[in-house]
């Protein structure tokens, strides 16, 4: 759905941000990465993004709504096709599954996500770690739910066989991400072959099909 005016408690799931709103959210991500959660203020964002505070309140609600929109926008970079298109035939489904894995790696291994996760980890001993909660609920869990639905659609069409969609997704996630994400969080650099995201995703899906292919 397009975003026009947002209540403060919206989770922005399935929200279609406009190009202008996406540009503002990119500025918000930069503020978070460079200065931490305290750097993300409506006044600072309005100045950096060259927009009015009134527009920010209209689009995202209060500051918590803005933070939720930032996390939802980052998660939305992992795209999911409509079920009818993804499951047209076995080859098409596998192509979409590989594309999903590629985009997942691009988001997780990207500088922005790594910085957001590091920031959240640094606040993990705080009772009010809103960023960590948002990354779990409106980032990780949102992507996981849509990925499980994609896998379920593949099972329904007879392309995959498994008993539990969550378990199958965790296997796919592990095959794709491996230990690279945790190494990046610890300051390591991805190896050359690990930066070939399409190749890594294709290998992960190949191995996934050996376990769950129908």
Image: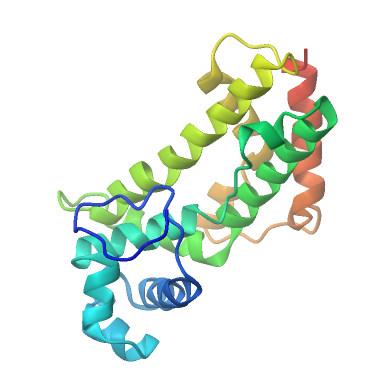
| Image position, residue 200 (x, y; %) | 77, 45
| Image position, residue 186 (x, y; %) | 51, 56
Q: Is 36 located above or below residue 46 in the figure? A: above
Where residue 7 sits, quadrant-wise, is: bottom left
Nearest to the observer: residue 12 or residue 192? 12
On the rendered structure, is 93 left or right of 14?
A: right
For the C terminus, the quadrant is: top right
Q: Residue furthest left?
A: 127
| Image position, residue 192 (x, y; %) | 79, 59
How did the renderer colour the structure? rainbow
On the rendered structure, is 48 left or right of 151?
A: left
Q: Is 145 located above or below residue 49 in the figure? A: above
- Determine if residue 10 is in view: yes
- Determine if residue 118 is in view: no
Where residue 63 sits, quadrant-wise, is: bottom left
Q: How many marks?
A: 0
Name the residue at 45% across, 59% down: 73
Nearest to the observer: residue 29 or residue 69? 69
On the rendered structure, is 82 left or right of 119?
A: right
| Image position, residue 168 (x, y; %) | 60, 21
Where residue 44 sits, quadrant-wise, is: bottom left
On the rendered structure, is 22 left or right of 170?
A: left
Nearest to the observer: residue 213 or residue 20? 20
Q: Is 27 located above or below residue 63 in the figure? A: below
Q: Residue furthest top?
A: 163
């Amino acid at each position: 759905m397009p975003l026009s005016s947002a209540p403060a408690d919206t989770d922005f799931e399935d929200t279609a941000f406009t190009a202008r709103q996406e540009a503002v959210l990119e500025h918000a991500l930069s503020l978070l990465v460079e200065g931490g959660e305290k750097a993300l203020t409506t006044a600072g964002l309005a100045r950096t993004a060259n927009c009015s505070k009134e527009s920010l309140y209209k689009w995202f609600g209060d500051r918590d709504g803005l933070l939720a929109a930032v996390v939802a926008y980052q998660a939305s970079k992992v795209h999911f096709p409509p079920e009818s298109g993804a499951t047209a035939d076995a080859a098409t489904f596998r192509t979409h599954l590989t594309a999903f894995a590629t985009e997942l790696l691009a988001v997780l291994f990207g500088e922005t996500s790594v910085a957001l996760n590091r920031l959240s980890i640094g606040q993990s001993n705080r009772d009010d770690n809103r960023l960590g909660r948002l990354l779990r609920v409106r980032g990780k869990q949102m992507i996981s739910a849509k990925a499980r639905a994609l896998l379920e659609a593949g099972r329904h069409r007879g392309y995959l066989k498994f008993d539990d969609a969550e378990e199958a997704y965790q296997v796919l996630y592990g095959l794709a991400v491996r230990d690279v994400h945790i190494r990046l969080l610890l300051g390591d650099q991805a190896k050359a072959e690990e930066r070939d995201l399409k190749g890594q995703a294709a290998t992960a899906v190949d191995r996934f099909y050996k376990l769950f292919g129908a």
